[in-house]
């Protein structure tokens, strides 16, 4: 594989061009959590009323899974710098020229009623697929919900990358940052039509993302992080309303979070109606092609809400990025079962070492929201976890700090120093590089990402994002397993270490 002309590459599937989704049976239901009284550590910022929590004394109550979702994710990289994916069977490239273009793994249409084949265990025996059980808090959903959402694009292309024309230059001095046109709106201002009947039962109220009732720490970044959360719910509602196209009316800087919510909505409907992932693939190959990382994270939210494990019932998604669903799973559990997941430091059961590591990366992203981007509070929170889990938590924090923003460059430099003292600077850098890569593929690099990257990685956005390409090239053409995903992360850390050694 060649990396000539600076193209950014994406891991491909095997020769058949199709990787069956992993299925994990016997999904664990996140238990309702209690809130025993506990001592509260003195906050560094104003805390909402009733801030007493379980475990460490600072976690929020566990919410039932019927509550509104909240997004806020940053994504891992997988893109081409000047190229794009070809649509199978046509040789055409969506939105880009032929330079550096590569063919996408074949994504065949899934007939309604099909589910993914059972994944075989290490001894070669197939595991039975878990039943698609809906949240008991949600009403029963009949199969006539198949046409609830507007389909976005042909289903034959799974993932496509953004043209390089929208990528923002990130020079060290006076970087030029793209600004949104004046006709774009904030998520709260986007008017969507709430559907009648059963579809309307899925509708999410944007007021549910208020940090106060959730007993999150309150600080200067509260308004920004709540707006990010509203973007997530707006994307979810757009799919439910059949107005997915309206997502592009949201400010470009916030649009990725909306696509994360859209990924959750598509996956929820696909699992409940047993379509094999038709809506999710349409979103990935069409309107959401610039946000594949966020969409896969959003899929993890859906599985957490349905008390299932990713990626049951979804076929022919990206073979490597599908592991990001466990990141979204971890974010959801930390957000809605905070006393159990953060206070008592419990992770989802029946997970192997690889899945638990990705779960903790998502939990680290959630801590950035839970502590309202307060660097000192994030540091103290991570210190409460055992050393064996801190590496992945630091990775998630680096991802959120770079992609979402909310802290100054000086504060992020202090975060970097602390991570180095804790022995996990490379993991913080790895998460930040993932965020740079996903911002670059979207074509929009906001000012806070431009400022955060030198503070955390010591380089500019484009170089940090390039580390993800270097690590991905080293994996070869057939990267698809959890071990491959972990090797990708490790390769980014090695690229950073080599850069520091050579400088």
Image (tube, rainbow, N blue to C red):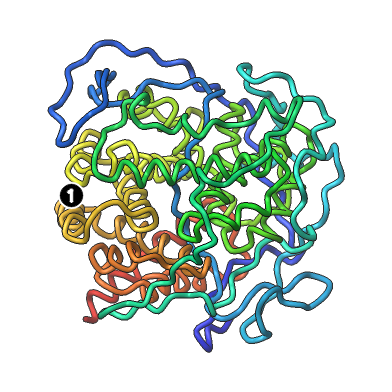
Residue 159 pos. (x, y %): 66, 62
* Residue 120 in sight: no
Picture quarter with the N terminus: bottom right
36 versus 258 height, above or below: above
Which residue is painted at 33% across and 54% down in the image?
A: 405
Count of marks placed on residues = 1
Residue 107 pos. (x, y %): 76, 59
Front residue of 485/254: it is: 254
Residue 272 figure quarter:
top right
Picture quarter with the C terminus: bottom left
Element type where label 1 sits in the image: helix
Front residue of 243/157: it is: 243
Decide: few, some or many residues near mark 1? Use Cα within 10 Å; few <14, some 14-19, many ≥20. some
Front residue of 20/404: it is: 404
Residue 450 pos. (x, y %): 33, 68
Which residue is painted at 55% across and 21% down in the image?
A: 29
- Tell me: 46 left or right of 491: left
Which residue is painted at 56% across and 84% down in the image?
A: 2
Question: Mark 1 — residue?
Answer: 422
* Residue 300 in sight: yes
164 versus 209 height, above or below: below
- Tell me: 384 left or right of 332: left
Residue 458 pos. (x, y %): 24, 70
Which residue is painted at 32% across and 36% down in the image?
A: 370
């Amino acid at each position: 594989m060649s990396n000539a002309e600076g193209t950014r590459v994406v891991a491909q599937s095997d020769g058949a061009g199709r990787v069956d989704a992993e299925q994990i049976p016997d999904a664990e239901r996140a238990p309702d959590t209690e809130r025993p009284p506990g001592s509260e550590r003195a906050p560094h910022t104003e805390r909402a009323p009733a801030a007493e929590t379980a475990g460490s004394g600072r976690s929020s109550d566990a919410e039932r899974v019927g509550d509104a979702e909240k997004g806020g994710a940053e994504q891992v990289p997988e893109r081409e710098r000047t190229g794009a994916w070809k649509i199978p069977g046509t040789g055409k490239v969506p939105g880009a020229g032929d330079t550096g273009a590569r063919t996408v793994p074949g994504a065949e249409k899934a007939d309604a009623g099909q589910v993914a084949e059972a994944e075989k265990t290490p001894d070669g025996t197939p595991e039975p697929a878990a039943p698609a059980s809906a949240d008991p808090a949600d009403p029963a959903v009949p199969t006539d919900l198949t046409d609830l959402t507007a389909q976005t694009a042909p289903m034959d292309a799974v993932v496509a990358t953004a043209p390089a024309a929208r990528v923002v230059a990130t020079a060290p001095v006076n970087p030029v940052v793209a600004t949104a046109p004046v006709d774009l709106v904030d998520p709260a201002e986007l008017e969507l039509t709430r559907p009648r009947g059963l579809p309307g039962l899925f509708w999410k109220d944007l007021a549910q993302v208020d940090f106060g009732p959730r007993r999150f720490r309150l600080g200067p970044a509260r308004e920004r992080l709540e707006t990010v959360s509203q973007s997530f719910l707006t994307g979810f509602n757009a799919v439910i309303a059949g107005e997915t196209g309206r997502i592009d009316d949201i400010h470009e800087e916030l649009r990725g979070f909306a696509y994360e919510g859209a990924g959750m909505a598509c996956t929820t409907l696909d699992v409940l109606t047993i379509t094999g992932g038709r809506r999710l693939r349409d979103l990935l190959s069409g309107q959401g092609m610039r946000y594949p990382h966020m969409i896969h994270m959003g899929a993890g939210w859906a599985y957490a809400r349905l008390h299932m494990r990713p990626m049951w019932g979804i076929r022919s998604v990206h073979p490597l990025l599908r592991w990001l669903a466990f990141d979204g799973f971890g974010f959801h559990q930390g957000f809605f079962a905070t006393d159990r997941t953060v206070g008592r430091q419990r992770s989802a059961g029946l997970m192997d070492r690889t899945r638990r590591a990705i779960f903790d990366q998502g939990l680290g992203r959630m801590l950035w929201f839970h502590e309202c981007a307060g660097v000192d509070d994030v540091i103290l929170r991570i210190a409460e976890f055992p050393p064996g889990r801190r590496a992945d938590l630091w990775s998630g924090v680096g991802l959120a700090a770079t992609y979402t923003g909310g802290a100054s460059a000086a504060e992020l430099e202090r975060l970097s120093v602390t991570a180095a003292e804790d022995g996990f600077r490379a993991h913080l850098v790895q998460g930040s590089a993932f965020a740079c890569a996903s911002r670059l593929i979207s074509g929009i690099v906001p000012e806070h990402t431009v400022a955060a990257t030198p503070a955390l990685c010591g380089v500019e956005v484009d170089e940090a994002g390039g580390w993800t390409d270097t690590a991905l090239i080293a994996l070869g053409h057939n990267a698809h397993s959890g071990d491959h995903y972990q090797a990708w992360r490790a390769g980014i850390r090695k690229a950073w270490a080599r850069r520091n050694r050579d400088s």
